[in-house]
Image (cartoon, rainbow, N blue to C red):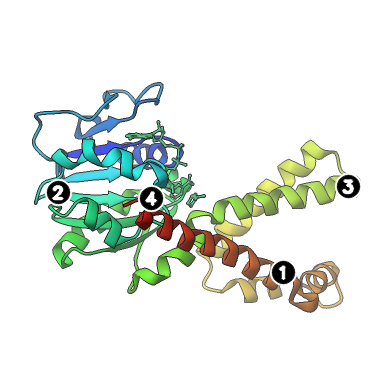
């Protein structure tokens, strides 16, 4: 597959996606990055400070800047979006209607919600768009090197999916940090606690991903009756503690995504 790919914004998330694509063997020459601040693009990727002029619209345009930058960025991007262009947007909270209003001439607009593990090909990639089945298949193929594509049946799910799949790594990093901090408080040297917590989470996630069993059954298998694990699980489970903490966390992130949708609509 050859790509003609123009990426606006190559920071944390756009950079992770580009890293994932390049690692999969796609030729760097397939990509042009437009970013006013990126210090350096990966080797052989064309880096421009402003949108190119006089060039034919590419097959893919990726919007990879902050959601609040969409209105200001639109005039420079518009001439590069043709009827044969698929606009891919990773902008949290910017809905298809807003994107379509900005790029009415696009062949399709597709919202993409990845996370930073795209750099390793291990991101969930939530997708929703207004293209046909052939376009969706093409986008699925494009996303394959970054992780697991998951098309949503309803765009309304995107706020919650953003909380879970997009923001989720930050929540897990907090958990890793809290485990290590807890162990340090209870007496382990902090650096050792950090190493142990990270190795444990890495192995536990890999095992869960490889296992035919769900996390509930895996937890049961760790917990010997009358042993240490059950005592800890009793603390997490008491009064629905962990479950309600996770629900509240996701709700807050989801609601912020919905607010951002309104803000992006209001920006015109
Ligand atoms: N950071 C994350 O884990 C995730 C971020 N996202 C979304 O990705 C987008 C980018 O977020 P980050 O990468 O974290 O931000 P960032 O601040 O690291 O990167 C944004 C980049 O866009 C560039 N930029 C700003 N205005 C531009 C313009 N008009 N044209 C071209 N480039 C421009 C900046 O120079 C910067 O390099 C956001 O819309 C966010 O909602 C989505 C999923 C996960
Ligand atoms: O925090 C944010 O708004 C973005 C969207 C998902 C992850 N980062």
Q: Residue at x 58, y 58 (%)?
A: 205
**Residue under pointer 3:** 185
Q: Residue at x 33, y 29 (%)?
A: 35
Q: Secondary structure at mark 1?
A: helix
Disc 3: CA contacts within 10 A as few (<14), some (14-19) or many (>=20): few
| Mark closest to the chain's N terminus, 1 or 3 | 3
- Mark 4: is the Cβ under 8 angstroms from ligand 1? yes
**Residue under pointer 4:** 91
| Mark closest to the chain's N terminus, 3 or 2 | 2
| Mark closest to the chain's N terminus, 4 or 3 | 4
**Residue under pointer 2:** 85
- Disc nearest the viewer among 1 and 2: 2
- Disc nearest the viewer among 4 and 1: 4
Q: Residue at x 21, y 62 (%)?
A: 136
**Residue under pointer 1:** 242
Q: Residue 88: x percent and y percent?
A: 27, 50
Q: Residue at x 13, y 55 (%)?
A: 107
- Disc nearest the viewer among 1 and 3: 1
């Amino acid at each position: 597959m050859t790509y003609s790919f123009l990426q606006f914004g190559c920071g944390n998330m756009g950079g992770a996606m580009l890293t994932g694509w390049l690692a999969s063997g796609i030729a760097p020459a397939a990509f042009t990055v437009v970013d006013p601040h990126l210090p350096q693009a990966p080797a052989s990727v064309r880096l421009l400070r402003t949108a190119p002029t006089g060039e034919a619209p590419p097959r893919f345009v990726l919007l990879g800047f902050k959601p609040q930058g969409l209105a200001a960025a639109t005039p420079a991007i518009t001439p590069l979006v043709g009827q044969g262009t698929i606009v891919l947007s990773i902008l949290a909270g910017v809905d298809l209607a807003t994107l379509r209003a900005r790029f009415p001439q696009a062949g399709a607009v597709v919202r993409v919600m990845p996370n930073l593990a795209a750099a390793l090909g291990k991101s969930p990639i939530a997708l929703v768009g207004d293209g046909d089945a052939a376009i969706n298949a093409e986008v699925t193929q494009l996303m394959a090197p970054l992780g697991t594509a998951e098309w949503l049946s309803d765009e309304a799910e995107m706020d919650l999916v953003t909380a879970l799949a997009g923001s989720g790594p930050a929540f897990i990093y907090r958990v890793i940090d809290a485990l290590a901090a807890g162990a340090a408080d209870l007496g382990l040297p902090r650096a050792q606690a950090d190493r142990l917590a990270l190795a444990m989470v890495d192995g536990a996630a890999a095992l869960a991903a490889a296992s035919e069993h769900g996390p509930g059954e895996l937890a049961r298998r760790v917990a010997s009756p009358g042993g240490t694990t059950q005592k800890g699980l009793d603390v997490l489970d008491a009064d629905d503690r962990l479950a309600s903490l996770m629900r509240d966390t996701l709700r807050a992130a989801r609601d912020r995504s919905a607010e951002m949708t309104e803000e992006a609509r209001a920006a015109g």
